Image (spheres, rainbow, N blue to C red):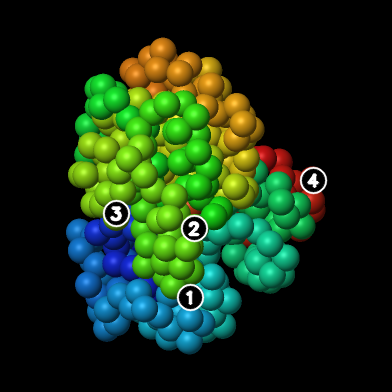
Amino acid sequence: MRIGLVAGPWIPVPPSTYGGTERVVDTLARGFAAAGHEVLLAAPSDSSCPVPLVPGMQPSAGEEMGLTISEFSHVIRAHEALQDVDIIHDHTLAGPLYLHRPEETPLVTTIHGPLNSNAVDIYQAIARRSAIIAISRDQASHAPGVPVTRVIHHGMDLKSVPVGTGRGGYLCFVGRACPDKGLLEAIMIARQAGMPLRIAVKMREPEEIRYFHDVIEPLLGPNEDFVGEVDNAAKYRLMGEALAFLNPIQWSEPFGLVMIEALATGTPVVGTLIGSAPEIVEHGRTGYLGDVGELADFVQAAEALDRAACRGAAEERFSAGRMVSDHLQLFTELIEGSMPTGLPDAARVHQNL
């Protein structure tokens, strides 16, 4: 197959630090190419993913994150360059709505964010001409009116992730500095459990900076070690030596990539029973899920879990190979015409959920 991939305009592929969607796109691009397919990637010009890149794209513009005009300009350039591919896999919001792409070329898009009311309107329109991938069953369940073609969990390249010992004598938190990610709750859980907490957070957006300085920073004490934003190697070392990874999220996160990263290092996840977490963490085997008030007690129980089972779950369920294979199967069905785009019947729409 000749596969066109479209990433967003704001973060290079792969990202140097923060960038979950871009990390997924990079893994897919490499996996498709390794499977013998031709890949053309439309991404910021400073991307380093080792596949052919669409020429003429602009450099990543993190300062324009979320700006409509920035995304529109990017996707127009992208789709104009993807006229001769067999299928387009678009990871942007605006791209699937571009009018001038070839009608005979199947397009599939992945929903990376929450399906709130505004997003539902958009994806219902997108579904008229595109197939839609959800990244968790929980994500799809929030909008039964959106015709989801397939649910495909994220995966990652496990070869680059070392298995840690878990003997560092601390808990860890990795995420964005925002209330939804549960950093405040993680601090309180670690204190209740009597364990040190190491904190690695992305803090770039104005609201993230304000939240950290107004809410989190005044609370930090000798029990907390703030290490800031880290690269992949440092992140995996941090996770791998932790007794447990705290993930007390406060919203229905569509897919917590950070959870499978922790499992890949052999570290169990202790978090709230919200969003996609039950689809990732096997309660009592690879971690513990519950209400915030229960999590401090679960920390001690997590110490007895088998770290090999955590790594094994990542290898079996969340590998790059599995994710790539699932996508290629769908692409083949779309190209051969055996899977219609925009399934209209609600019963059929959610047959894979």
- The nearer-to-camera label among 1 and 3 is 3
Inspect this view and state whether residue 258 appears. Answer: yes
Q: Amino acid at mark 1?
A: Gly
Upstream in sequence: badge 1 or badge 4 = 1
The residue identified by callout 2 is 215
Upstream in sequence: badge 1 or badge 2 = 1
- Checking the image for residue 347, the label placed there is 4
- Circles 2 and 3: CB distance less than 8 Å? no
Q: Quadrant of the C terminus?
A: top right
Q: Amino acid at mark 3?
A: Gly
Q: Where's residue 95, x and y in %?
A: 50, 74
- Characterize the local packing of mark 3: few (<14), some (14-19) or many (20 or more) Cα atoms within 10 angstroms: few
- Characterize the local packing of mark 1: few (<14), some (14-19) or many (20 or more) Cα atoms within 10 angstroms: few
- The nearer-to-camera label among 4 and 2 is 2
Upstream in sequence: badge 4 or badge 3 = 3
Disc 4 to disc 2, C-alpha distance: 45 Å
Disc 2 to disc 3, C-alpha distance: 16 Å
Disc 1 to disc 4, C-alpha distance: 34 Å
Q: Amino acid at mark 2?
A: Val
- Checking the image for residue 66, the label placed there is 1
Q: Quadrant of residue 55?
A: bottom left
In percent of the image, x 55 and y 29: which residue is there?
295
Inspect this view and state whether residue 36 appears. Answer: no
In percent of the image, x 32 and y 30: which residue is there?
170
Q: Where's residue 60, x and y in %?
A: 30, 75
Q: Nearer the viewer, residue 305 or 313?
A: 305
Q: Is residue 97 left or right of residue 89?
A: right
Q: Is residue 61 left or right of residue 151?
A: left
